[in-house]
Amino acid sequence: MGLQISSRECGDVTILDLAGRSTVDTEQSEFLSKCLRGLIATGKHRLLLNLASLSRIDSSGVSVIVETYVSVKRNGGELKLVSPKGRVLDVLRVFRLIEVIPSFEEENEALVSFRPQGSFATPALSALRNNS
């Protein structure tokens, strides 16, 4: 089975569900690259790649993920991974991407990580200002 991509939105996060294989011999990596570039061009800069149903990925697929990660980061966005398993997880470990790109086991956990960290500190800062 070739690569299948479906997308959905959760707030300002675009989730891409990847299924099948992303390998150079089937030219599926170019399909993934075009899809990701299209999202970035339309202003989507908070991306979550759901890899739960992706059975294989090779260096060309990894290259697309790295290229997208760098592009999104340069524009102040984020790219994260959820549910890499089996051979896909093995490949991501070999390329040490698990150490660089945030990766989560559960989608809800990944979505929570997109929330702004500064919003939790605001009440504490207000309290400090009022006590001065």
Image: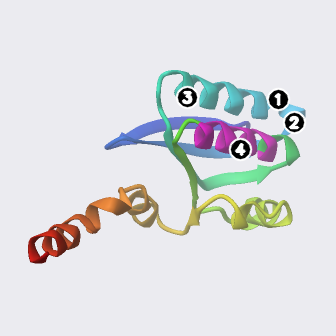
Q: Amino acid at mark 3?
A: Ile
What residue did someone put label 3 on? 40
Q: Are marks 2 and 3 in contact (CB under 8 Å)?
A: no
Mark earlier in primary sequence (4, 1) = 1
Image point 17% across, 68% down: which residue? 123
Q: Amino acid at mark 2?
A: Val
Mark earlier in primary sequence (3, 1) = 1
Q: Where does the image place residue 1, in percent across and percent down from the top left?
A: 73, 40
Image point 63% across, 26% down: which residue? 37
Q: Amino acid at mark 4?
A: Ile
How far separated are the C-alphas under marks 2 and 3? 22 Å
Q: Residue furthest bottom?
A: 131
Q: Are marks 2 and 1 in contact (CB under 8 Å)?
A: yes
Mark 4 surroundings: few (<14), some (14-19) or many (≥20) residues within 10 A: many
Q: Is residue 68 magenta?
A: yes
Q: Are marks 4 and 3 in contact (CB under 8 Å)?
A: no
What residue did someone put label 2 on? 24
Bounds of the magenta segment: 62-74
Mark 2 surroundings: few (<14), some (14-19) or many (≥20) residues within 10 A: some
Q: Is residue 130 left or right of residue 65?
A: left
Q: Is residue 6 above or below residue 59?
A: above
Q: Where does the image place residue 4, in percent across and percent down from the top left?
A: 63, 36
Mark earlier in primary sequence (4, 2) = 2
Report the front residue among 121 and 100: 121
Main secondary structure along the magenta-highlighted residues: helix
Q: Amino acid at mark 1?
A: Glu
Q: Where does the image place residue 61, in percent across and percent down from the top left?
A: 78, 42
What residue did someone put label 4 on? 65
Q: Nearer the viewer, mark 4 or mark 2?
A: 4
